[in-house]
Image (tube, coloured by chain):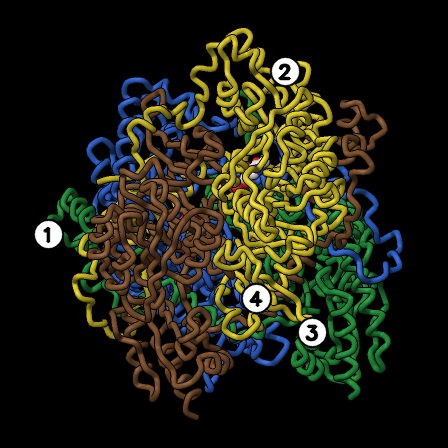
Chain colours: A brown, B green, C yellow, D blue
Amino acid sequence: MSYFPNGSSSRSVMLEKIGIPDGSVEQLFKAIRPELRAQSFNLPEGKSEFEVEHYIRELGSKNVNNLTYFIGGGFYDHYIPAAVDSLVSRGEFFTAYTPYQPEASQGTLQAIYEFQSCICSITGMDVANASLYDGGTALYEAAMMSVRITKRNKIVMDGGVSPIYRKMIRSYTTNLDIGFSEVPVCHGQSDREELYKHIDDDTAAIILQNPNFFGAVDNHSDIVQKAHEHGALVISSVYPVSLGMLKTPADMDVDIVTGEGQSLGIPLSFGGPYLGFMACKQEYLRMMPGRICGSTLDIKNRTAYVLTMQTREQHIRREKATSNICSNQALCALRALIYMSLLGDKGLKQLAAQCRNKSEFAKQRLSEIKGVNVMDSSPTFNEFTIQLPVNANEVIGKMIERGIAAGFPLGRYYPHMEDYLLIAVTEKRTKHEIIRFADALEDVLWS
Amino acid sequence: MSYFPNGSSSRSVMLEKIGIPDGSVEQLFKAIRPELRAQSFNLPEGKSEFEVEHYIRELGSKNVNNLTYFIGGGFYDHYIPAAVDSLVSRGEFFTAYTPYQPEASQGTLQAIYEFQSCICSITGMDVANASLYDGGTALYEAAMMSVRITKRNKIVMDGGVSPIYRKMIRSYTTNLDIGFSEVPVCHGQSDREELYKHIDDDTAAIILQNPNFFGAVDNHSDIVQKAHEHGALVISSVYPVSLGMLKTPADMDVDIVTGEGQSLGIPLSFGGPYLGFMACKQEYLRMMPGRICGSTLDIKNRTAYVLTMQTREQHIRREKATSNICSNQALCALRALIYMSLLGDKGLKQLAAQCRNKSEFAKQRLSEIKGVNVMDSSPTFNEFTIQLPVNANEVIGKMIERGIAAGFPLGRYYPHMEDYLLIAVTEKRTKHEIIRFADALEDVLWS
Amino acid sequence: MELIFDKSDFDKAGLKLPSPDVPEAQPLDEVYLRLDNTGLPSVSEPEVVRHFTNLSRQNFSVDTHFYPLGSCTMKYNPRFTEKIASLESFASLHPLQPQLIKGGMLTQGAMQVIFSLEKLLSEITGMHSFTTQPMAGAHGELTGVMLIAAYHKSRGDKREYIIIPDSGHGTNPASAAIAGYKVKTIKSDSKGVMDMNEYRNAVDEHTAGVMLTCPNTLGIFNPHIKEITDFAHSHGALMYYDGANMNAIMGKARPGDLGFDIVHLNLHKTFSTPHGGGGPGAGPVGVKDFLSRFLPVSRIIMREDGSYALDYNRPDSIGYISPFYGNFGILLRAYAYILYMGKEGLIEASENAVLNANYLKYKLKDKFNIPFPEDTLHEFVISLKDYADSGVRANDFAKALIDVGFHPPTIYFPLNVKEAVMIEPTETESKETLDAFADAFTALADIADNRPEYFADCPTGSSVCRPDETAAVKNPNLRYKT
Amino acid sequence: MELIFDKSDFDKAGLKLPSPDVPEAQPLDEVYLRLDNTGLPSVSEPEVVRHFTNLSRQNFSVDTHFYPLGSCTMKYNPRFTEKIASLESFASLHPLQPQLIKGGMLTQGAMQVIFSLEKLLSEITGMHSFTTQPMAGAHGELTGVMLIAAYHKSRGDKREYIIIPDSGHGTNPASAAIAGYKVKTIKSDSKGVMDMNEYRNAVDEHTAGVMLTCPNTLGIFNPHIKEITDFAHSHGALMYYDGANMNAIMGKARPGDLGFDIVHLNLHKTFSTPHGGGGPGAGPVGVKDFLSRFLPVSRIIMREDGSYALDYNRPDSIGYISPFYGNFGILLRAYAYILYMGKEGLIEASENAVLNANYLKYKLKDKFNIPFPEDTLHEFVISLKDYADSGVRANDFAKALIDVGFHPPTIYFPLNVKEAVMIEPTETESKETLDAFADAFTALADIADNRPEYFADCPTGSSVCRPDETAAVKNPNLRYKT
Ligand SMILES: Cc1ncc(COP(=O)(O)O)c(C=O)c1O
Ligand SMILES: Cc1ncc(COP(=O)(O)O)c(C=O)c1O
């Protein structure tokens, strides 16, 4: 087999040395007594690389490819520069593991430090960790963290938080003694009045999202102030690309920030691997889950990077750890770091501006279509909702036939919104594509 | 611009230091007086990576892709293992240059040494060089080499040598005092009788190919003997994959072996970059063109690799060099080396066997089609000729409509062979594809 | 090395964006706007490429070094699975695409991958169904414990404890705890496996489940495994199998056959997906039939016509564990790996992994104390406590190994061995490499005997040596600041 | 490092082939068969990957190091052009495909790439048409000299000599010679450019052509260039432009405007395609109108309907230079690079290249002897002959630079400067890097003054130090033998 570097002669020598001269490796498994043996192992025969590739390409062609994407929902079709793919493909990065041995892992460690720095920069927060699984688990971890910090157990979730993430948080906490209230939002900003009704002195945290699931941009400063008055924390889930334009969570005095980093150079890849990130105020550092890398000096006074604050973690604290996370999404964090390095300060701003400009252009074109109602109760970044004169699912199907993924049908998560579409526009969508989208939609609706 | 690491502030400082305080880089070009300035520079505006990629993908889709290839003609559709692409993509390999400084280039140098070793192994020859541009220029270089060695100037070319290569050799030597004779072959082995008529004591070399352009396999030992009797050399152009099965040129006592290495892990890529290789008997080493890497010891008696025999080369000998070659096809040689290392001894033999087995299977299926005449005057490796009842061009067009590149129309190079097709089969062609090919051909011819 | 931020200058950029082709939008109201800079480093592409290329060169990795990190299965990561994961027909696929047209008709290929992988993993482990949602081993554990909770809850049975042996990985108790359980730890016996007496005393009607690794982190296959699972079951507790060590027994034993009810696998260990410098991995979870109804949504099911659909209608499900289907790109790699290896290939992988480990153990056993030397499979644990007594600790050996070109094994784990050095060579290393490692390790023991002071400066050949970790905690410097 | 052959064992393999799906053929007659082993190393894929990964790490490269190799334009190689060259719609295209259906209707995209690239290169150089067939600079030179020959022959004019200045690259005289010409070498004058008197005396009715590099290998743009080309023309000779240094003058001057008749470009220099450890490159050749009919076949032409076709019907053509259209994968990269850079980008590339070189010259000029310091553009040449007199040669400086992390500049070229060190920083290096290099180089000069013996062991940090090249020639060991 092509992955085993010992030929039969080496194997014989090895077996002989360890006292199995008859050459039967089976004897090494004698602890697995016959009655404990596998009762079946009915797998296909091995194939060659060429055959497997061929087969999987065939499967790939069973997906409908080359749709022009106007779907987002927290996961966006941004361009990934070739340098990102090229650099994360270096064996020294992708075939290493968690940098337990700093002297053999300065590459990974410095990258984590730089990643944490970039996350702090774009969010404005004090400290960040090395990554969590995805934006949803990051938000859940933040909720747990707020419970630990405040020693309270009531959580208020804004309805503008991704319904997927809200479901995840509910799942994870079913067996825990945590009370939730969810405050509905309908394609606009957070409903302050309703929210405030739920905030009291037992509240551990308010969970917000900006831009929210409907694309609405908000300034949550007032909510944060209210929360803090009650001794509650505020957790905000953000879309990192938007931070090239939008007021930072730090500026709103948010306590814990999380987000999905997929938009930072990570392929959509049918849902993963993605990148959860988390940043918080300095004072909550020791309550944060996940690995953290710090800069220190070595015995020769050289700068060195190490995993630090490890007494928070499972391998030291076991059942008392802040989280059970061990393997995280390191290579995705590296992708995000390289992507952010390529973008730079100006690049992130320009990218955000392009996304919004194109989104506003799309809004305008779509609003010209008879029967299409572009929701405008609040400003948006690069995603917005429209109301159609018919059920959204019908329209989507016909648009797919025209090669366009026209948006996400909000009815999927909001039963009263069967005729709403959530539309996302990134820098990759050309003017031409947007016009084609609007024309096709008009065509589908009216001819 | 994204490829320039100096911002405007650095540039100002630099200009100031070199005495151009007004910040105008133009002054550095003052030697180019106004009357010498570019009279036009009418180029398009720059584009982003995303836009260029998008545009070039569009051009790519203007090629007819996904044809099932039964064309070869010296260039073959073999599978390239992913490890080859992955390893040659390492920056340390592909962004280095000719290893002039051995201490900064042991990676490239050892790889060349191993490549030379592999070429010697598969051809059976004594020594090999680091690469030449392609199989055609390699053959031309061998011809020139034979002229230098024998101090004679008559060359006999077998008609089984690729017509492309024969044309190339003719082009390169138009202005030189070299006489050529070409001995026709028709879809079979070399015509000894005719060949021998042209060999005499002025003959520098006989140029042969095995398998020849029609796929015919030959044992050229007798021709070699005849040539040597006349003091002439024999040059043989080979298909490296076939050497997993066929008698080696060394076994036939050939003096200089050249070939196209594309089949060894190099993509077809519309004609290049490919890989010319050359190997010869020890005694001709100092007449060989191209770079050569040798093993030696360093001052601490460690094994070290260096470019050697450099007094043959242009940078030392200028107009007296054995060749003008400077940049060669190093990265393609590295591809071939990695490919050969993955294949190994058994792998090359199995690969050759699979190619031939599939080719024979195709022959058999095609021979069952009414009106199709599979030429069988000599054994073949993985390529063979068939005669059709109609003009080959007609058939090809209809086969293309069925997604199959059915073979190369020999009429293109041999005017009397308008109804012949040259068909190649590699390990990538499945039984299913071969059967579909035969069925489609039958369909095209008879329905 | 310099930080990427140190190369920053305000008007440099590493990426050109497309030229604007739409009008500029009306700006947002200032209350919504970021007014400061983002703080990202502004550098050119050549600088980014050189920076990260040279950063990478400071790492040890499987591609460059022997990396016998015990419990981590640092085996070779095939190149073709990387290629497959980057095929655009998968890599560009939006996770919401299946929801655009009912039942996932737009993503049949991707769904088939998951469906088929679940089937293969079920057969490999002897389980009945699998979810691919968990994104790492620990995430699988959490999912598993949530399944345990859901099961007992469905029976109106409130249980309190999860039982875990002291040799269990830290994630086991952590996962149990964050899912709401208390943890009971059982000591290991003199053979290195869970003490049966203590175990029998611990299990009762408050026991929700038992989490075991088998072979355990000492590499030992517990001969009482069937008794253990039977005993738990007889008290209504469920058995959880931490599959991190599955690489030892493929085709030899299956957790399902041994009586486990829930299993997680680490695809980034057993199924050769890359470790990525710490992740991403994938930790799919398999269960016996009676637990299937609790698995996370969505499930991928096959319709009668052979097409695949997403099923959300599962009222007993524990809910969403991942936003979608797990770390799909990792799943795809593992699927390709399994198809490539096939039945025989996987069996041989385990056989070679066990042979390599036993050969290396043989090479080291005379010189070193191996507290639990019997019947180890894919890994084994050395105790360096004798050396530690004379001042050379496991950590010192580790640092010295770096100087001779080996990534150190796992140290100080499992916790039930003093000065533990946990060695897992994997099947993708050659005898020559094992010999070289054994020689080097043995040579260090000689040095420890004669010149213990040698270790203080090790490693000398790396860009850093023994960073001050205490200072790192005391004065946290966790990010670049201008 | 061990050779890959040292890891070989007969029943190992790094690649699985598809399982046979057709019957085994009747074997060939034994006279056609290979009876011995092929001698290829039999190793597993993990060993191959680790071997070549670690081999690569022994190289200096642009990605890892400053690499100011004069005349070679070792600038950054964009990653996206690599990606583009690997797009299947081009990388999998068979070169004979255009011949399957008349006129290349099956490969319109690829042909458009070549056609468009030829147009762009024509505009950049001020020529009228281009062939992309030549596979490197030297190959372009040979093509160019063959065009010169074809031109004179077409006029029944038999000429004998090609004139080349002594600062010309070795490939110039070599190309002239193998195409059948004698070479006349012209010395450089005190300003570093071709001596005009000697030149005027050399040109006569036997002169077929003059090959010039401009700026020349000293980085100097010859102010008499127009006189030179006019003078050659007035004697019926053609002017050949060696475009290796085109990176200095894009948008500033064009060889076509300066009176050159034939030009080659090195796409692997000016147009950022990777050097690949020695190649492949590409050396397209451009000509003025009156020479177009001699260009190699095939030519790609545009039909009236805008489609592209291959034209073989060119009776005056010098014939086939390449089997097909040249190193297409390299052409595609260069095409993408030019589209990316655009007009302004290319101009700025030259400006930054020249600024960087002049800045570095400024940093070094006080300490070092720069024999021809005036008006240099993208590169400059230092003479270390003063140091050489006291025993420290250019080669010693080169070796010492390796220890401090810089790839040495070109040394001992051009031949008209003693102990030459030829430095071309390129536009893709930062001021900080140039400063660091200047400091290191200056520091070496100080060491040379005070401790010349320091150099003997340099480099100390590489895996080898000063291999015995004489022994390598005397006892050639050019391949592995069992
Ligand atoms: C025995 C064992 N269990 C669980 C885990 C946790 O797996 P992961 O890191 O994928 O979360 C590990 C990983 O190190 C392990 O070795
Ligand atoms: C001035 C000059 N001319 C010609 C060449 C030859 O180019 P190539 O190596 O591509 O054949 C070179 C390359 O080193 C050069 O520097």
Corner quadrant of residue D151: bottom left
Provide the residue designation for mark 4: C313
Q: Residues within 10 Å of mark 2 (few under 14, many from 20)?
A: some
The reply to whether callout 3 and callout 1 are in contact (CB within 8 Å) is no
| Any part of residue B333 in sight | no
Residue drawn at 41 percent across, 84 percent down: A441
Provide the residue designation for mark 2: C368
Circle 2 — which element? loop
- Tell me if D382 is positioned left or right of D180 in this view: left
The reply to whether callout 3 and callout 4 are in contact (CB within 8 Å) is no
Check disc 1 and give the amino acid type: Asp
- Tell me if B371 is positioned left or right of A161 in this view: right
The reply to whether callout 1 and callout 2 are in contact (CB within 8 Å) is no
Name the quadrant of the N terminus of chain D: top right
Circle 1 — which element? loop
Name the quadrant of the C terminus of chain D: top right
Provide the residue designation for mark 3: C305
Which of the marked residues, 3 or 4, is nearer the chain's N terminus? 3
Q: Which callout, 3 or 4, points to the residue nearer the camera?
A: 4
Provide the residue designation for mark 1: B22
- Chain for mark 4? C
Circle 4 — which element? loop
Residue drawn at 51 percent across, 70 percent down: C99
Q: Is mark 1 within 8 Å of ligand 2?
A: no
Can you say whether A34 is above or below D106 in the image? above
Q: Which callout, 2 or 3, points to the residue nearer the camera?
A: 3
Which of the marked residues, 4 or 2, is nearer the chain's N terminus? 4
Residue B344 position in % (x across, y down): 71, 44
Check disc 4 and give the amino acid type: Asn
